[in-house]
Image (tube, rainbow, N blue to C red):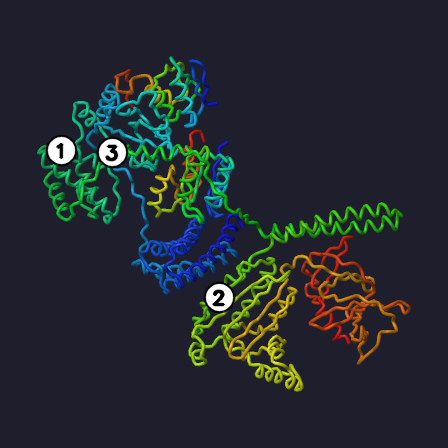
Amino acid sequence: MPLELHEATATLTDVVTVDEVEPLAAWLRATEKPKVNLRRCNHLHTGALQALLLFRPKISSAPANAFLAEQVLPLLAGGNGTASRQGSEPP
Amino acid sequence: MNPLLAQFLAEAADLLTSVDEGLLQLERDPGDPELVNEVFRAAHTFKGSSGLFDFPELTRLTHAAEDLLDAVRGGKLDLDSGMTDDLLAAFDLIRGWLAHVTQHERLPASAGADAAILITKLRGPLGGDATTPVVEKAPIVHVIAPPPEWLSHFEQEWLDATATWLTTTSSTLRFARYLPDEGCFFRAEDPLHLISQVPALARIAVVPPDEWPSPDDYDEYACLIGFVLATRAGHGELDHLFRYVPDQVEVVELDGDALRRFLNGEVAPEPVEAADAPVVDDPQDPAVVEDAYAILAAAQTSLRDQQEVGGVRLASIAHSIASAAAALGDISELSDLNAEQLTETVNRLLGSTPAPPAAPPPPALIERSAPEERIDRGRADDPGGQVGTKILKVDQEKVDHLMELVGELNVAKNGLTFLADSAEEEFGSRVLSRRIKDQYSGLHRIAEELQAAVMDVRMLPLSVAFSRFPRLVRDLSRRLGKNIELVMEGEDTMADKDVIEALADPLVHLVRNSLDHGIELPDERTAAGKPPQARITLSAVADGDAVVVEIADDGRGIDPVKVKRKAYEKGLISEEELESMGDQEAVELVFRAGFSTADQVSDLSGRGVGMDAVRASVEKLGGTVTMKSELGTGSVTRLRLPLSMAVTQVMVVSVAGQRFGIPVDLVVETVRVPGGEIGRVLHQDVVVLRGEVVPVIDLAAALRMPWTPDENDDRRILIVSLHGQRVGLLVEQFHREVDVILKPMEGLLAYADEFSGTALLGDGLVLLVLNMKEVLGLAARAA
Amino acid sequence: MTTVMLVDDSATMLMSLKSILTKAGYSVETAGHGKEALEKLAKGVKPNLIISDVNMPQMDGITFVREARKAPGMRFTPMLMLTTESEQTKRNEAKSAGATGWLVKPVAPDQLLGVIKQVVPGA
């Protein structure tokens, strides 16, 4: 199951496809202080990323996947990338 | 042969047939768009599959044909008979090539030269050798550009560090903005997935919507965000990756200075934005011209407004101008980067370019404005899908194999009757015998149904046999200068595939005969008070378990008097017959062996093959052929063939201890007469049956088998009917009638004409089935 | 297992693509034209990717894609069109009908497998 929804925590596993977007959004909408575990997530559909950006849940566990960890996680941590955050090394 | 090639060849045969048919129909009905489309599609499919193999000439030739058909389809050209001829010739050439490929798995050596001639012809109406390989131009325009405002989506800190790094290392980075449209999820696009594949990705950032919706209004399937990214990947890599969404992606190449300028608050002016519009290499396209015009106008403005332009800025303007010039078909040399020269070039280009009706909106803005369409597309969950007839294409061999298995089942089933007999005779159990017979009848019913079902699978429409005639009639009538309309009726009538296949040659012969001898030249027809256009009708109709095929023409018909005289001259009929023979009988003389002669053989009607050959092949199929003709009004040849020839019912008889089969439809009756009742008339044994004298042939003698009937026994005589004549066959014993699958004679026996085939019997014995016509001939010679 | 549905009226093309995909470990469904493919979808075949020809009898590829998008569970399924070099306008038509992208015939194995990785996450 790519998506496990519990009372306060959602666990996203492996490839989260567009099929998971609706239940994830519904859960985020209904959950008061949502936490999302991305540790074993390998891909987030754009729609899932967008839902996370809108609802801003707490990321309880960072993804192991390199692309998600290096490029996507920073997007979820700050305010849509507009806020200045910890800079990374130049390329 | 490699199975893919085998598949291609099989498919090619079908496609060629439909192309031929379609072209001929088109010639008659040139306006039919559906028909043009069909022919185009066949040519198109052909080209597509040919690309899988190393047959470049084939691909080139079909490509040329496809282009011509496409022009016809698009209404740019009207198909005339010259084009039709060229197209037909092209597909004929291809047919020849494929025959060669079937043999040698490569094209003939002459293919290149032959193709070149036809390609030139086919391209003629299109305006010469328009081998325009439509090169897919890089859809994304790249410029070393002033920094676009969207860089602001990256964090300032990171930009700052990156600018320093790029300046220090004198290197550049590609920056891209990707703005997917709202409905993109419904095309299965996943922008983040695409971005994750960008090689050497340095950084990504989200382009948020202008305003996030409230959670209650949030539509999770509308894509509201976009991305900006920085990468060291080459332009080629980016072009490839974003090739499906070129209009949603903007790529710029920036160096440290450019980033620094951005950080200092310099934002890109308009011209560069416009330069990001797709540039296509087609000066005819008004949209492109319009875009180019806009770019040039913008460049002109920025050159005029900014006196001090230099370095990267000037380079980017020069690049924009060069792109615009290329789009207008002007390859300008812009090697010297100086402002005066650029201004001059722009002025020159603008002077020669018509002003566009209106300025185009920036492409990026169009994408985000189609929410209604998206809803339409997305939320319709109704199960679509219409149900059509499902046709299964099955390899002929598989059906044949199935038929063989049915035959074996029949044989195994027949074995039960032998078992029943021995249960009673050897083991004395009538009860067991009865039960076996009950089992047998159950099995018999199933086997019969199975057989009928398989036979049904083997049925093909007569159109398969008819399909070659439109082409044949068209070509031959042109060559002969005759004007002929071919009418085909009842093509849907079904018959067994073996019958259809075997019908092909006789039909061709008959149609050619009509064309060649039957139909008069237009002048002659007019003189005879007939319309100049002649008509040949090919029709098929099912009649019980037979199919009747007629070839009718309204030509000059056959003169019975001439035919009789000719037959007499050739010694085919006696003087007496010459006098007494009726017209109908006379017409049928054309079927006699030796009637067709060299002076009748033309290029068209085939050499040396007469109507007797037609009759022989039809009879071999178990059919009959008759002809009716009226002098001056035309002829009708009628073929009557069994619908199916897969299963033959044979009567099993034995002679000299050996069993033989005789087709049941020839058998009239079986009689037993005392030896003394056999009479002898003119060296011929005869028996008198109900007042009719029937000649009796000793089958054993005819087949040269030693056998003398027991003096005291009754003689067993099988009465058969052949060409309306009754003949008795003296045999040793009658056996049962059985259904058998007749297999052609193979090996040494292939030349034994007295047998028409073999069949396997229930007790494992091979039964030879007699060809009665030949057997009677043998008997006559032996006598 | 990733299932790819191939729709093409050319049996040769089907055979060639199928062998590439099967060797690469994909499960393959084939259909000879759009209607047959829709029928399969209606019966519950749920491919992870559909690759369809453009020019087909009975129902052209673009109409097929438009209809297939309405089939149960196919809203978000990647669909690619098989096109030739010269069919650029068809590509745009196909995209507005809901196609994800296209392939250019003849399709080389690398091109085919590459594009699947590109459009099917986790394939």
Q: Please, is residue B390 above or below residue B568 in the view?
A: above
How dense is the environment of label 3, judged by Cα within 10 Å: few (below 14), some, or many (20 and up)?
few
Query: x, y (%) of residue B205?
Result: 30, 24
Lower sequence index among marks 2 and 1: 1
Task: Identify which residue is drawn at 87% across, 49% down.
Answer: B424
Task: Identify which residue is drawn at 88% across, 46% down.
Answer: B429
Lower sequence index among marks 1 and 3: 1
Numbered mark located on residue B365 in the image: 3
Query: x, y (%) of residue B270?
Result: 17, 34
Q: How many marks?
A: 3
Could you tell me how far apart the alpha carbons at marks 2 and 1 are, in whole angstroms? 79 Å
Position of B740 with respect to B14 (left or right) is: right
Q: Secondary structure at mark 1?
A: loop
Identify the chain of the residue marked 1, using the numbered disc in the image: B
Query: x, y (%) of residue B317?
Result: 17, 37
Could you tell me how far apart the alpha carbons at marks 1 and 3 are, in whole angstroms? 30 Å
Numbered mark located on residue B37 in the image: none
Numbered mark located on residue B487 in the image: 2
How dense is the environment of label 1, judged by Cα within 10 Å: few (below 14), some, or many (20 and up)?
some
Position of B27 with respect to B330 (left or right) is: right
Q: Amino acid at mark 2?
A: Val
Task: List the residue tagged with mark 1.
Answer: B310
The quarter holding residue C107 reads top left
Name the quarter where the C terminus of chain B is drawn.
bottom right
Q: Secondary structure at mark 2?
A: strand
Identify the chain of the residue marked 2, using the numbered disc in the image: B
The quarter holding residue B644 reads bottom right
Identify the chain of the residue marked 3, using the numbered disc in the image: B
Could you tell me how far apart the alpha carbons at marks 2 and 3 are, in whole angstroms? 60 Å
Q: Amino acid at mark 3?
A: Leu
The label nearer to you, 1 versus 3, is 3
Q: Nearer the viewer, residue B582 or B738?
A: B582
